[in-house]
Image: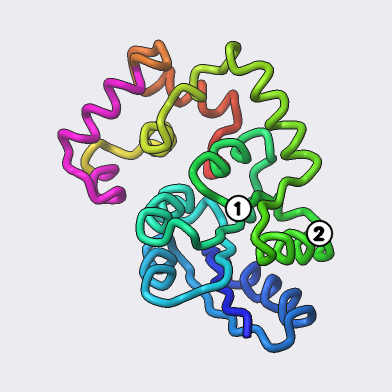
Amino acid sequence: MIKILIADDHTIVRKGIIQILTAEFTNAQIEEASSAEELIERAVSKNWDIVITDISMPGRSGLDALQQIKLSKPHLPVLVLSMYPEEQYAVRVLKAGASGYLNKEVAPVQLIHAIQQILSGRKYISPAVAETMTNYLFKEQRKQAHEYLSNREFEVMKLLAAGKSIGEIATVLKLSVSSISTYRSRIFSKMEVTNTAALTVYVIDHKLDDRM
């Protein structure tokens, strides 16, 4: 019996994925999580054959959850299924340990193919992701400013740009206020900005957060 954990903050999305999977994997045991915190708790408390997760959820992001899961279960396959285009997140999540990355607009047959490939012990790289990774390798010396940020800095940047205060970000990410202040200083330095307003403009211009 295949054991699958699905994480997405939208119930209709989870149910749609379950409907697709149960038609293909008739004996699968499928459970759900609606937040990053719930995803981490369920992922590390049971044994799963594969985890399928969104990257944008309330509170901690799916990317942060992926890193936490990989610390406890480094060999657990994780497929990221997101609304973000491949060029924005594919390389970042694959480097963080994901076994594959898919845009939510793909056909069900492609989702099934990705899962089957990952369950066989391989990584799933779509043609779009392969092209993105090739471009990344050949153009790394011409990175955009946000690509120099660590995953944690990237999350803090998006929260700052969304109007969250230092205290609010500390609560969301379960870190100290001083840690968030340090991250903010590093972000401003790497992004070559002097205030949150300029950072917000950058995030909007580069379409880095669907909540804005």
For disc 2, the marked residue is 110
Residue 10: x, y in percent? Answer: 57, 66
Q: Is residue 185 magenta?
A: yes
Q: Residue furthest bottom?
A: 27
Q: Which mark is residue 86?
A: none
Residue 183: x, y in percent? Answer: 28, 29
Secondary structure type for disc 2: helix
**Is label 2 in contact with label 1 (beta carbons under 8 Å)?**
no
Distance of label 2 from label 1 (alpha carbons): 15 Å
Residue under the image location 22 percent in, 45 percent down: 175
Residue 170: x, y in percent? Answer: 24, 44
Mark 2 vs mark 1, foreground winner is 1
Q: Which residues are magenta?
A: 168-188
Residue under the image location 36 percent in, 69 percent down: 41
The correct choice, above or below, for 171 with respect to 160 in the image is below
For disc 1, the marked residue is 99
Identified by mark 1, the residue type is: Ser
